[in-house]
Image: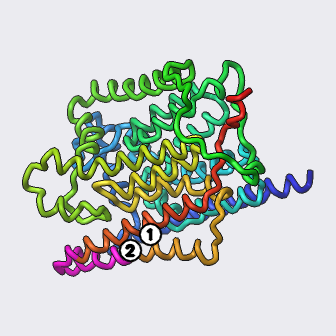
Amino acid sequence: MLEGSMKALNFRSLIIFSAFLRVFLIVYGEWQDTHMEVRYTDVDYLVFSDAAALIVSGKSPYKRSTYRYSPLIAFLLTPNSFIHQSWGKFLFSASDLLVGYFIRKILKLRGVPENLCIYSVIVWLFNPFTFTIGTRGNCEPIVCAIILWVIICLMKGNLFQGAIWYGVVVHMRIYPIIYALPIVIILDPSHFKPNKKPIITNWNSKHHKTHLTSGPTKSFNPFSRSRILFSLTSASVFFLFTGIFFYLYEWEFLHEALLYHLTRTDPRHNFSIYFYHIYLNYERQFSVLEKLVSFLPQLMVQLLLVFRFVHDFSFCFFVQTVAFVAFNKVITAQYFVWFFCLLPLILPWTKMKLKWEGVFCVSFWIGAQLHWLFWGYMLEFKGKQVFLQLWAASLLFFAANTYVMITIILRHTYSPVFNLSQKTM
C-alpha cells in the first residue's frame, strides 16, 4: 500500500512540477513580449485571439486574415477578451498536462510497470518542444489530448463516446482522418461485443513471440455493429459541427477551415521536400499529374503502414503520423507535436537502446532540423539567395525522418492491443 502511494505521489509530483514550469513560462512570455524585440508568443496565438475577439463582437472569425481553423478554437478563446489575454495559453497548457495524464492512463491499461510509465510521461512533459508549444499559444495540445482520449475510449470499449470525440477532432484539425481506416479495421466484432469490454493484451506478453497479423481478417465484415456505430456517430458529429458553422459563416468557413487544408500549396520556405518546386511554379496551375506525384507516395505509405501494424494501433498511429508529416506538401514545426504525443505510447515496447542508437537517432533528427533552420535564417533574415541549399536541407531532413522511422519500426516489439486469441475462442 505504501509502495502504491509513493508511486502515485511520484506521478502527482511530476504533474505539479510540470504545471509550475508551464505557468512560469507563460508569465515569462508576457514579460518577453513586452520588453524584447523577439516575441515569445506564437504568431498563431495572436490570430486565435483576434478571431475570438471578432466572435465576441458578433462578427465572423474569418474576418481575421490567416485564420484557417475551426471556429471551435476561436470560441474556446473568447475569454481572452474579458478574463485575460493569456486565457488560451493556460487552456492549451492544461491540455498539455492532460496529454501526460492520458499517456499514463493508456500505458496502465496495457499493464506497463509504473517506472516505465513515468519515464514515458517524462518524454512528453519535459520535451522542450512540447512544453513550449502550449505556453507560446499553439492549439495542438488540445488536439493531442482528444486523440489520446479516443484511444482510451477504444481500449475501454466506449465506442459511442470515442466516436463523438473522433468526429470533433477531425472537425478541429482534418489530419486525424488518417486514423479512420485503422480504427474501422480494429473494431472487430470478436473484440467489441455488447455489454463486454475488449480484452487488452498485457505488457508482459511482449516477452512472448507474437505473429505479425496484417490488415483485416478474411472474415472482415464492414457492416458489423461496432463499425457502423462508430462510423455513423463520428460522421454525424463531424457534419453536425460543419453544418452549424456553415450556417453561421457560410462558404468562407468551408474554404478556410476545410478546403484550404486539402488543397494547400505554400510557396514560402518550409521543411517539405516539395516547397522548392511549389515556389518555382506557384504562379501557374499545377497539373493533375503533379498533384498525384505528391499525393500517391503519401497514400501508398499510409496504406502499407496500416495493413502492416493495424492491430498494434498505438504504434500504427505513431508511424502513420510520422510518415504523413514527412511526405506532406507543407511541413511546419508545430506538426511535430502530432507524433510527439504518440511517441511515449510505444516506448515500453522498443528494443532500441538509448546508448548509442537512440542518441544517434535523436541527434540525426535534431541536427538535420538545425541544419535546415540555419539556411532558413540565412534566407529570411540575411536575404541570401540560398533556396537550393535550403531544398537540400529539406531532403536531408526527409532522410532523417525516414531513417528514424525505419529504425523505430525495426526495434519495435509488435504487440496487438487487443487479444487476438479471442478470434479463435
Q: Quadrant of residue 267?
A: bottom left
Residue at the spot of label 2: 35
Evaluate whether residue 102 shows in this view. Answer: yes
The secondary structure that most of the magenta stretch takes on is: helix
Instruction: Tell me, for residue 31, which label it has, or none.
Output: 1
Kindly identify the residue that appears in the image at 46 percent across and 60 percent down. 133
Tag 1's secondary structure? helix
Instruction: Tell me, for residue 49, which label it has, or none.
Output: none
Q: What is the crowding at mark 2: few (fewer than 14 residues within 10 Å), some, or many (at least 20)?
A: few
Report the span colored magenta. 371-388
Q: In this view, does 295 lie to the left or right of 322?
A: left
Tag 2's secondary structure? helix
Kindly identify the residue that appears in the image at 23 percent across and 47 percent down. 292
Give the residue at the far right of this rendering. Answer: 1
Residues marked 1 and 2 touching at CB (< 8 Å):
yes
| Badge count | 2
Which amino acid type is marked by label 2? His
Determine the CA span between mark 1 and mark 2: 6 Å
Say above or below: 329 vs 166.
below
Coordinates of residue 179 in the picture (x, y in percent) = 47, 40
Kindly identify the residue that appears in the image at 42 percent across and 26 percent down. 235
Q: Is residue 352 left or right of residue 174?
A: right
Q: What is the crowding at mark 1: few (fewer than 14 residues within 10 Å), some, or many (at least 20)?
A: few
Say above or below: 33 vs 319.
below
Which amino acid type is marked by label 1? Trp
Coordinates of residue 412 in the picture (x, y in percent) = 61, 58
